[in-house]
Image (tube, grey):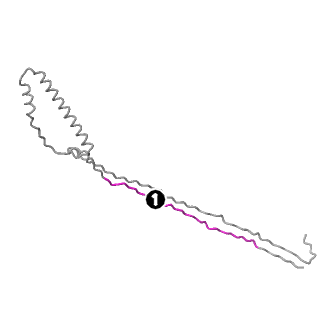
Amino acid sequence: MTLAIRTTYARSTIQIHHPTSRIQQQVTQARIDYDGPSMEIDLRSPMTEMGLGDYKHLMRTAANEGNQAALAGIARRSYEGDRFAGEMSNQDVVQRLSKEQTQSDVPEVNVGMIPKSRPSISFQYQVNIHWEQGDVAVEFNTQPPRIQWDIGSVDISVKGSNLDIRG
């Protein structure tokens, strides 16, 4: 008779995967745009006061002065005609009118500083800041451990015997 006992021990296997991480960073961006500095000096008003303005202003001024002179001449001739008609009986009316026309008034002289108005001065400076916020993205990759368990066993075999092991 042969008695064979075969024992297989329990065995466990553990596989561990270390966690991994992925980090993605977007750097903060700043862009600065600027315009200037610039300075603008407008000399139109002082130059016009000194008679050095643009031709359109000169034409308007000359046209207005011409209109005023024509209207003043018409008014003076109308006044003289009315006087002449009213004093027609008087012999020396023509002499007095001609004497008044030949005597001119002494022109008035004014002394002043020109230009009286100041030039218009404007400054411009502009800054635009475009800001893009940065970002950080962290991603973790984890896996649970893998555990494998093999159950042990005991095998008993008896060969070539008439042995009754039932009890």
**Which of the 4 quarters of the picture holds residue 115?**
top left
Q: Residue drawn at (78%, 74%), measured in percent from left and top?
A: 8
Element assignment for label 1 = strand
Q: Quadrant of the N terminus?
A: bottom right
Residue placed most toward the observer, 52 or 29: 52
Residue 85, given in percent of the width and then of the height, sits at 13, 22
Q: Quadrant of the C terminus?
A: bottom right
Which residue sits furthest bottom?
1
Amino acid type shown at disc 1 = Gln
On the picture, is 157 further left or further right than 129?
A: right
Asked if 104 appears above or below 12 in the picture, the reply is above
* The magenta segment: 9-38
Label the magenta part by its dominant secondary structure: strand
Residue placed most toward the observer, 140 or 156: 140
Asked if 19 appears above or below 47 in the picture, the reply is below
Q: Residue drawn at (88%, 76%), measured in percent from left and top?
A: 158
Residue 21, given in percent of the width and then of the height, sits at 58, 64
**How many numbered callouts?**
1
Which residue sits furthest right?
162
Q: Residue drawn at (24%, 38%), measured in percent from left and top?
A: 63
Residue 167 at least partly seen: no
Q: Is residue 15 magenta?
A: yes
Residue placed most toward the observer, 136 or 59: 59
**Which of the 4 quarters of the picture holds residue 110?**
top left
Q: Is residue 37 magenta?
A: yes
Residue 39, given in percent of the width and then of the height, sits at 30, 52
Residue at the disc numbered 1: 29
Few, some or many residues within 10 Å of mark 1 (<14, 14–19, 20+): few
Residue 103, given in percent of the width and then of the height, sits at 8, 33
Which residue sits furthest top?
89
Residue placed most toward the observer, 80 or 25: 80
